[in-house]
Amino acid sequence: MNSIYDIWQSVLDRLTEQLTPTAMKTWFDDCTPISIDDSCLVLHSPSEFKSSIISSRYGSIIKEAMRDLFAQDFDLRVLSGDEIDEYAARKKAENSLPEMAGYTFDRFIVGNSNKFAHAAAIRVAKEPGSSYNPLFIYGNSGLGKTHLLLAIGQYIHENEPTKKIAYVKGDDFTVQMVKAIKDGNTEDFQNKYRNVDLFLVDDIQFIAGKQATQNEFFHTFNNLYEAGHQIVITSDRPPMEMSLLDDRLRTRFEGGLMADIQPPDLETRMAITRNKAAQLGLILSDEAVEYIAAKITSNIRQLEGVINRLTAYKEILNDVITTESVDRAIKDVIRTGTFIPTPDIIIRETARYYSLTAEEIRSQNRSKQVARARQVSMYLMRSLTNLSLQDIGAQYQDRNHATVLTSIRKVEDLLKSDSTMAGTIRDITSNINS
């Protein structure tokens, strides 16, 4: 099933089994599908009278057909006449915050592993700034932290559109701050985040160890907190496990509500699989849903990746969804065996940790920060891959194996004498594996 039109055709086939040809022609000939919007099938009929009849007389049949197709409940909305223009305008307005598009509480599947974080997020969305400030959501990559973060923003945007909302990733906060200092626009940068009603920060762990960034974030946090404005933060670990995080930030993060998200159980993974398939208009058998959920156990993003792959197979190759195609999709998405990161990933994540670019690490730049980042990346490449010293050197403009070995030994010596280096290696390794 490739599109909203295919889904609607399946619903019409169900209606045809229960209605006369005259009824079908009278009410549904000029009825067209518009979208599936947050578990709601949206249709359009030119006549207000017809749209009313479709909703009141045939709505239950349509919703039952949708439930049979996707194994979940759907609402029905039938637009009439020019209402479609108003609907399109509203959807455009909703997407004025592009990061939040599609991230709603309705689309978040709740299970035992995340129900506390979900309940806390809803409470914050309904009563921002009154309690649970800051809300700190943590857990491994791909479990839904960003979804909850942006769902809070989406909810507040829809219900209180005059509220000012700012969203930023931890590493982007650093990049923007450095650029503002370079361009002499620090006041504009500070106003961007200190004068909002809702501050959403994703992956805060990336500011740990960056002293100037932490100092700026501390003052931003204080300004917002003292003004009673809501702060929501996500991280891949709790504050106490961020060895390079300033104590004054750690205590402020821990002073709010901390909510963790664990990997979902089988039942929740099956529900997520069905929900994602429904959003993309893909019909999966119960056997296929259970098979996917049994194979992918710890990462929701991988579940979504498999569904995306299957949808692509269906749309591009007109492929029938079989066990073989599901296996192929799973193999494309998950890493089988031991994960061995590529040199590009190691250099990229090391560069991000040190607020540098991959090109700088690979270059001949000998500044202290770049040299240290280069040494760390070489150490990680030796530790996490099967590459020889010569192969590692080839990643850095053909440096010889002796230079690589010297860099690795410098990091090994620091691990023995400098406690912060162990935290650095652990943090970058965690980011690589995520």
Image (cartoon, grey):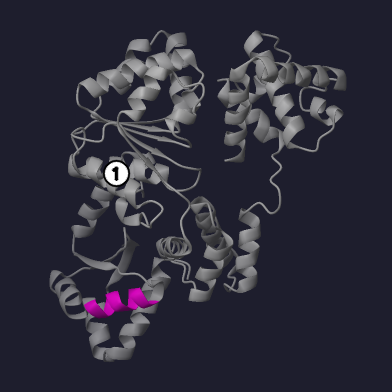
Q: Tell which residue pokes out farthest to the bottom in this image.
A: 20
Q: Which residue is drawn at 31% across and 69% down?
A: 73
Report the span colored magenta.
Answer: 60-68
Q: Nearer the viewer, residue 17 or 256?
A: 256
Q: In which quarter of the image is the C terminus?
A: top right
Judge from the rendering whether residue 377 lies leftward or rightward of residue 174; answer left or right.
right
Identified at 35% across, 70% down, the residue is 72
Q: Which of 268 and 392 lies nearest the eye of the viewer?
A: 268
| Dot 1 amino acid type | Ala
Residue 60 x, y percent position in the rendering? 23, 78
Residue 374 visible from this viewpoint: no
Would you call the spot at circle 1 few (<14 residues within 10 Å), some (14-19), or many (20 or more)? many
- Residue 166 relative to residue 212: left or right: left
Q: Name the residue under label 1.
A: 121
Residue 3 in which image quadrant: bottom left
- Residue 420, image x and y in percent? 58, 19
Position of residue 19 relative to residue 285, above or below, is: below
Residue 3 visible: yes
